[in-house]
Amino acid sequence: MIAQGVALFNLGRQMGGQFGIAWLSTILDNQNAQNRTVLSQYLAPGEHAVTERQDAVANYLTSRGYFPEEAGTAATAVIQKAFAQQVATLSFNACFLAIALLFIAAVPVLIATKLTLGRLAGRHGNLKQRPACLENTNERTSDL
């Protein structure tokens, strides 16, 4: 009987983990797409800030030994990498917020469930029943 209970508990734990990972993965994918769309509008070709940043990175790379022909392409790659990091950072922040909100919502539900189950157990007299092993030890100590 205990082995079946342990198996059922492990099944619930595994399924909960799988659903949680799937939920979080879905949020991450959606946030990634949304953040990429929002941030990409600031990287439009011909945008003054983008051109200025690309020139600054290209000048830096040229001063560090890149050929001027390769520095422009490398500067674009550096900007793309920074863009991808910003998208990932915003997406993971949204996932962290979702997990925090889940825990904030779950705590009152768990407390209410525990209180309700305690009251139901008290009405049915389950709290006053003592395990047989404790009843035997009390009888032995009272005889001494």
Image (cartoon, grey):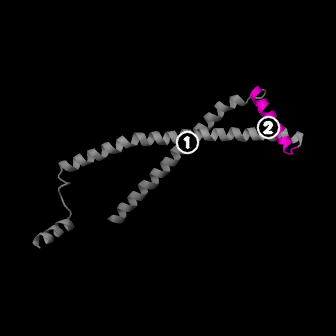
Q: Which range is magenta?
A: 48-66
Tag 1's secondary structure? helix
Q: Nearer the viewer, residue 67 or 37?
A: 67
Relative to 33, 43 lies left or right? right
Relative to 85, 54 lies left or right? right
Q: Position of residue 79 (x, y in %)?
A: 74, 38
- Residue drawn at x 81%, y 33% as measured from the top left: 55
Say which quarter of the image contains residue 66: top right
**Is the residue marked by circle 1 packed among few (<14), some (14-19), or many (20+) residues within 10 Å?**
few
**Label 2, label 1: how many angstroms apart (C-alpha)?**
35 Å
The stretch drawn in magenta includes residue 37 = no
Give whichever of discs 2 and 1 has the lower sequence position. Answer: 1
Q: Three-letter amino acid code at disc 1?
A: Thr
**Is the residue marked by circle 2 packed among few (<14), some (14-19), or many (20+) residues within 10 Å?**
some
Q: Quadrant of the N terminus?
A: bottom left
Q: Position of residue 8 (x, y in %)?
A: 38, 58
Asked if residue 79 is positioned above or below residue 131 in the image, the reply reads above
Tag 2's secondary structure? helix
Q: In this rendering, which labeled residue sits more in front, label 2 or label 1?
A: 2
Q: Position of residue 64 (x, y in %)?
A: 84, 44
The stretch drawn in magenta includes residue 56 = yes
Task: Give the residue pinned by disc 1.
Answer: 26
Asked if residue 12 is positioned above or below residue 81 in the image, the reply reads below
Q: Position of residue 6 (x, y in %)?
A: 38, 62
Q: Nearer the viewer, residue 71 or 30?
A: 71
| Residue 41 visible in the displayed image | yes
Circles 2 and 1, Cβ within 8 Å, touching? The answer is no
Residue 57 shows which numbered tag? 2
